[in-house]
Amino acid sequence: MAIVQATDQTFYEETKEGYILVDFWATWCGPCKMLTPVLEQLDADNSISKIVKLEVDANPVIAQEYGIMSVPTMLLMRDGEIVAKTMGYQPKELLQQFIADHQ
């Protein structure tokens, strides 16, 4: 499944069903840029059913609502509810373990 770029307007629709990894990121963030190919690999490996990215500067309403204070921040969500949270760049293996630990 393709990685979905969400906005303040589409976030709830994109995260309401399924097991989803949400990446809160910013264009100026170096670790966020490093994380993008890792997320693409997770998506290609079908490590998670869906990945949603939300750029915090362009979409401040959702970022504020979820209390995002630093990027990258990733949330694991199941049917719209937060299951787990992690912050900072992580290599593929650590993210896979994070996902597996909370399934």
Image (tube, rainbow, N blue to C red):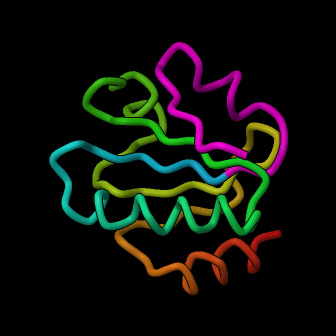
Percent across and percent down for residue 12 are: 65, 24
Q: Residue furthest top?
A: 9
2 in magenta: yes
* Residue found at the very far front of the displayed protein: 44
> Who is closer to the viewer here, 12 or 28?
28
Residue 85 at what x, y percent from top left? 55, 62
Residue depicted at x 65% and y 43%: 2
For the magenta stretch, what is the residue range?
1-20
- Magenta segment: does it hold 102? no
Q: The C terminus is located in which quarter?
A: bottom right
In the picture, measured across the screen, residue 65 lies left or right of residue 52, that is left
In the rendered image of this protein, does residue 103 appear above or below residue 55? Answer: below
Picture quadrant where residue 63 is located: top left
Residue 86 in picture, x, y percent from top left: 49, 67
Give the residue displayed 67% in from the left and 62% down from the top.
44
Q: How many marks?
A: 0
Q: Going by the image, does 89 lie left or right of 48?
A: left
Relative height, residue 41 to residue 98 (above, below) = above
Horizontally, residue 31 falls left or right of residue 37, namely left
Against 20, is 35 above or below?
below
Where is 83 relative to 98, above or below? Answer: above
Residue drawn at the location 79% of the way across and 48% of the way down: 78
Residue name at image x 52 percent, y 28 percent: 6
On the image, the x and y values in percent for residue 23 come to: 48, 50
